[in-house]
Image: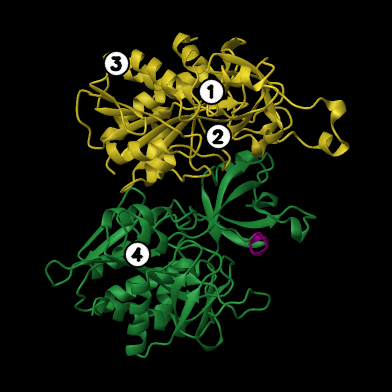
């Protein structure tokens, strides 16, 4: 398996939307020596330009988001526990009894025990507003010394290897994309390429808008994760994609219809270079591609994703064999897309 | 080409959102005849410019979307049945049990799972039977990502009415082409823009409007009518003339544009009516709000049964829209 130290660091770092400096610091440290220009724009996107051997016909921008779904503290109750809201799309069913970190402070998400619930309450998942975080304190005053309203919390879930080829971590969405970008940045590139580590994707692909507005790419490549529902109980037409099926290339998702020429070139490129890919088989989800495609005068876009099980939970599971294929494909596409007549 | 022939031609060519007409299309070659330059932007919008004789002319952008709603293959099962996702606002009741054709000409029938109650009918319950009996066989004919739409069904009805799938918005495209043929001496640089991906959220018009950066804009599209059984109350009637949009769910038109179109229609004795569309958005929004914005409105063709296979219009309304469009481009909004 590839060198996972960097990916582990990235996944374990805390970076809920709007509060991802820790992630950016890791990335800056990793890539500063490989960029010809590196800066953070006004909304907080980290943008690197890496010069290649040539300037390409089409300006290429590669993009992955630094933020992750998480929680934000909204109140401190008398007994010292904390109310919170989800930041980004979190299914409230995954929250109960999970371990979280509010900065350096550990906590547990708790709700009424089963014997205190009414018959009606037992039938439905506990809504987020009825959950609180217990950090072990006993009064509001005690909590106030440790946590402030507006602090963000992440799932506490260590990066581990799972079986021969897989890994489990929180925030694989989209630290995996950031990781691949770091790896590509360290290679010699054919063409000048912009690398944007974007902000606030999980709350509506916001950072990518300003990144695209200032870079003005002709072609955008988004590195992402996508739901792999190749699991027990899901019928074939709902699986979206499969683990160890290769890098997922999208034709359409919930917010973008991808460029057909770029898709075709990606498929041909994969074939030529023996790279394993699969097509996303269900119209759902969305990512920064929508912002890249439709900001200013527009850009042609491609998304390359990791088939990821249990997305937006503490336990995202990815297969590093797929990640390898993503990296190979993205690296080759810089060359193919740069040359393209569009 | 006569208007009806033109519309029939346009409805017979598949252009589901995201796979619209390109350089080798009828629209591209046709609009090239009447304009000075034609380009295609990254989103696939076809942008044609007819320069004014006047120096320093202001920019007037017309937008009609060339995409239509349709279906996209997302899965082929082991028995060779093709599962599709809807693109745009699909009416499942109208879609079930119809003939469809794929981009490569392969035909099929779009049907619902047996015993599906009408109330439970959704795209998830539909599949295309293309006559194949295994996945292997089917994969030789169609592939994941391929689009299909209704088999062309253009029909002339009594008294100058016509019916077809995809009149939304092939009639708008036809109007732009015919306007480009007719407009003489416009004081404006006129941009005839055939937009992409309107049906999935007004996407193409946004980048087109950014690049063109117009001063004035008119979207040309279809609108609902209030003259069919069971419909919501609405003033617009089929046969009562060109609809001048005041508002829809995506846009409130510029008062200046609404007043201008009313004035032009009255001066030229063009039958017209005012439109407030309760549900549905149009490219008008992009014209109004992209970049630094434009004074914009819309001219709509009153259309019955929108997003069904039998959208129906009255050619009298079409002709009124055409005349209004031409007069608006030849007139002076600041006069």
Left or right position of A38 against A151: left
Q: Position of residue B226 (x, y in %)?
A: 59, 78
- The answer to whether residue B329 is seen in the rendering is yes
Inter-mark Cα distance, 1 to 3: 23 Å
Instruction: Estimate how packed mark 1 is, as few (under 14), some (14 to 19) or many (20 or more) residues with alpha carbons within 10 Å.
Output: many
How many circles with numbers are drawn on the protein?
4
Cβ atoms at labels 2 and 1 below 8 Å apart = no
Which comes before the other along the chain, label 2 or label 1? 2
Instruction: Estimate how packed mark 3 is, as few (under 14), some (14 to 19) or many (20 or more) residues with alpha carbons within 10 Å.
Output: some
Of residues A79 and A61, the one nearer the viewer is: A79
Inter-mark Cα distance, 4 to 1: 47 Å
State the residue position of label 4: B27
* Circle on res. A88: 2
Inter-mark Cα distance, 2 to 4: 42 Å
Of residues A106 and A277, the one nearer the viewer is: A106
Q: Position of residue A242 (x, y in %)?
A: 59, 28
């Amino acid at each position: 398996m590839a060198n996972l130290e960097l990916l582990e660091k990235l996944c374990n770092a805390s970076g809920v939307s709007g509060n991802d400096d820790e992630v950016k610091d890791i990335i800056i440290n990793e890539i500063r020596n490989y960029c010809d220009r590196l800066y953070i724009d006004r909304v907080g996107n980290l943008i690197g330009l890496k010069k290649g051997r040539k300037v390409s016909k089409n300006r290429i921008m590669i993009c992955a988001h630094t933020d992750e779904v998480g929680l934000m503290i909204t109140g401190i109750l008398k007994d010292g526990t904390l109310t919170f809201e989800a930041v980004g799309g979190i299914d409230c069913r995954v929250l109960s009894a999970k371990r979280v970190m509010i900065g350096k402070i550990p906590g547990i998400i708790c709700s009424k025990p089963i014997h205190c619930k009414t018959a009606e309450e037992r039938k439905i998942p506990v809504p987020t507003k009825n959950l609180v975080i217990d950090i072990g304190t006993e009064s509001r005053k005690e909590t106030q010394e440790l946590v402030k309203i507006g602090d963000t919390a992440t799932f506490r879930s260590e990066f581990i290897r799972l079986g021969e080829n897989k890994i489990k971590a929180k925030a694989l969405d989209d630290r995996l994309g950031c990781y691949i970008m770091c790896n590509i940045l360290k290679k010699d590139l054919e063409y000048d390429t912009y690398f944007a580590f974007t902000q606030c994707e999980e709350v509506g692909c916001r950072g990518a808008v300003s990144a695209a507005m200032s870079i003005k790419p002709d072609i955008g490549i988004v590195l992402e994760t996508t739901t792999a529902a190749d699991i027990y109980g899901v019928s074939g037409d709902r699986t979206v994609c499969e683990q160890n099926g290769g890098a997922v290339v999208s034709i359409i998702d919930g917010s973008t219809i991808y460029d057909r020429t770029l898709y075709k070139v990606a498929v041909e490129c994969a074939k030529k270079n023996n790279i394993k890919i699969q097509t996303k088989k269900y119209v759902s989800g969305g990512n920064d591609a929508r912002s890249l495609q439709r900001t200013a005068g527009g850009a042609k876009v491609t998304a390359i994703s990791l088939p990821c099980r249990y997305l937006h939970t503490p336990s995202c599971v990815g297969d590093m064999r797929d990640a390898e294929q993503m990296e190979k494909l993205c690296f080759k596409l810089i060359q193919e897309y740069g040359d393209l007549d569009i | 080409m006569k208007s009806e022939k033109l519309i029939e031609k346009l409805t017979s060519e598949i252009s589901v959102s995201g796979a619209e007409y390109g350089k080798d299309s009828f629209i591209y070659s046709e609009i090239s005849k009447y304009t000075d330059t034609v380009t295609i932007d990254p989103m696939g919008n076809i942008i044609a410019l007819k320069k004014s004789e006047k120096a320093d002319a202001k920019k007037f952008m017309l937008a009609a979307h060339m995409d239509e709603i349709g279906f996209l293959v997302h899965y082929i099962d082991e028995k060779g049945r093709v599962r599709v996702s809807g693109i745009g606002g699909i009416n499942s009741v109208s879609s079930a049990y119809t003939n469809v054709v794929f981009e490569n000409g392969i035909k099929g029938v779009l049907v619902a799972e047996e015993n599906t109650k009408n109330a439970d009918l959704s795209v998830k319950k539909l599949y295309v039977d293309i006559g194949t009996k295994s996945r292997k066989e089917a994969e030789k004919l169609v592939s994941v990502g391929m689009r299909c739409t209704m088999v062309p069904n253009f029909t002339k009805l009594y008294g100058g009415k016509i019916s077809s799938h995809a009149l939304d918005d092939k009639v708008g495209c036809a109007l732009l082409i015919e306007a480009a043929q007719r407009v003489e001496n416009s004081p404006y640089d006129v941009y005839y823009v055939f937009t992409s991906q309107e049906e999935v959220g007004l996407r193409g018009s946004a980048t087109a409007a950014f690049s063109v950066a117009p001063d004035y804009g008119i979207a040309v599209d279809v609108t609902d009518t209030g003259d069919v059984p069971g419909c919501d109350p609405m003033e617009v009637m089929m046969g009562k003339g060109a609809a001048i949009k005041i508002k829809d769910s995506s846009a409130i038109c510029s008062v200046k544009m609404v007043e201008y179109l009313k004035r032009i229609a009255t001066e030229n004795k063009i039958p017209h009516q005012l439109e407030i569309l309760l549900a549905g958005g149009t490219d008008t929004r992009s014209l109004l709000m992209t970049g630094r914005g434009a004074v914009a409105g819309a001219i709509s063709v009153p259309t019955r049964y929108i997003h069904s296979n039998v959208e129906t219009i009255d050619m009298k309304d079409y002709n009124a829209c055409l005349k209004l469009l031409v007069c608006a481009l030849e007139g002076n909004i600041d006069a």
